[in-house]
Image: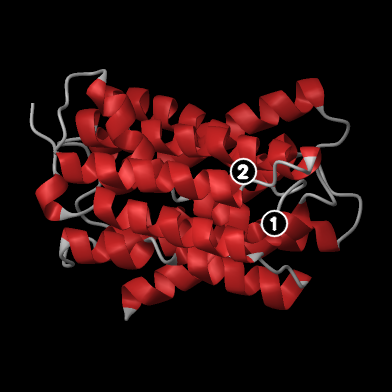
Amino acid sequence: MGLVLIAIIWGVGLVPLRLGVDYLGPAAFNALRFAFAAVTLVPVLALNHEIDRKVMLDRSTLLIAFVLGGLLFGGASFQLVSLRYTSLANVAFITAMYVTIVPAIGFFIGYKYRALIWAGVALAIVGLYLMADLDSALMLRGDVFALIGALFWAIHLLVLAKWAAGLNRLVLVFYSFVFCALISLLVATLAEESLLPGAPLGYLWPLLNGVVVIGLCYTLQVLMMEFAEVFAASMILSLFSVFAAIAGYFVFGEQLAMTAMLGAALILGGCLLAQWPKARAWQ
C-alpha cells in the first residue's frame, strides 16, 4: 500500500510543476524545490544515529553526490520545460521510459541483456511514436524535451547502481539535492530574469513539490525499498505515469486520443518488461 501511495504522489506531483512554471523559469523553480527537499531531509539525517561527521564529510559521497546533482538538474530541467508544451500524460509516460533507456546505455559500458528486455525497449519505442503528436510542433518539442529528461534519469540510475555501493544513501540523496539546488541557482542567475516568484502563490508549488514529492516521498521510497521485493516495487512505482494521466484529466482537462492511449499502454508494458527479473543483465 505504501508503494502505491508513493506512485500516486509521484504522478500527482507533476501538477505543481505545471502550475509552478507560470511563476518562475525552470532553473529558479528547481533551485527552490530542491532546496526545500534538502531542508526536509535535515531532521531525518539528524535523527539517524548511523550518520556522524565522518559519514557527512566522506569524499566519495560528496563526489558521487555532485555528479548525481548535475544529472538531477538535467532531468528535472528538461521535464519542467517539457510541461510547457505537452500534456502531463505524455511527460509522465515518456519519463517512465528511463527504465528502457538504461539497457541501451548499459550496453555500451559492458552490460549484456537478455532478449526480454530488448522486447521491452522495442515496445516502449513504438509507444513513444504513437504518443508523439507529429502534427503539432509544440507538443513534439515537449515530447523531445521529456525524452531528453528521461535520458538524464537513466544515467542517474546507472550512476547509482555502479558507483553508490557502500555509501550512505540518505546522505548521498541529501547532498545531491543540495548540489542540484546550487547548480540550478547558478544557471538561473546567469540565464533567467528572476530568482524568486513575483507572487506569494509562486512559492506554494515548489514548496509542495519539494517537501512532499521530492523530500518526504523520496525518503519514504528509500526506506521502503529495504523491505519490498525489487521487481514488485518497480512495477508498482511505474504506475506513477497512470496517476499523472488521471491528474492531468481532472486538473487540466487533458484527454488522450486512442492512439496516444495505445502508445501509453505500450510504454508502460515495455517498462514492466524491462524490469522483469529474468531480463536482468550480466557482464
Classify mark 2: helix, strand or loop.
helix
Quarter of the figure with the C terminus: top left
Three-letter code for the amino acid on which mark 1 is drawn: Ser
Looking at the picture, does residue 68 appear above or below residue 275? above
Q: Residues within 10 Å of mark 1 (few under 14, many from 20)?
A: many
Which residue position is annotated with label 2? 79
Q: Are marks 1 and 2 in contact (CB under 8 Å)?
A: no
Q: Could you say which quadrant of the image residue 222 lies in? A: bottom left
Where in the figure is residue 39, as x and y percent of width and height? 53, 52
Which residue position is annotated with label 1? 87
Q: Could you say which quadrant of the image residue 228 lies in? A: bottom left
Residue drawn 69% across the image and 62% down it: 16
Where in the figure is residue 90, as x and y percent of width and height? 61, 54
Give the spatial CA distance, label 1 vs label 2: 11 Å
Residue drawn 33% across the image and 76% down it: 2
The one nearer the camera, 45 or 37, is: 37
Quarter of the figure with the N terminus: bottom left
Three-letter code for the amino acid on which mark 2 is drawn: Gln
Looking at the picture, does residue 45 appear above or below residue 189? below
- Relative to residue 194, is residue 206 drawn left or right? left
Specify whether residue 173 is in view.
no
The one nearer the camera, 208 or 87, is: 87
Single out the mark in the foreground, 1 or 2: 1
Residue drawn 23% across the image and 36% down it: 161
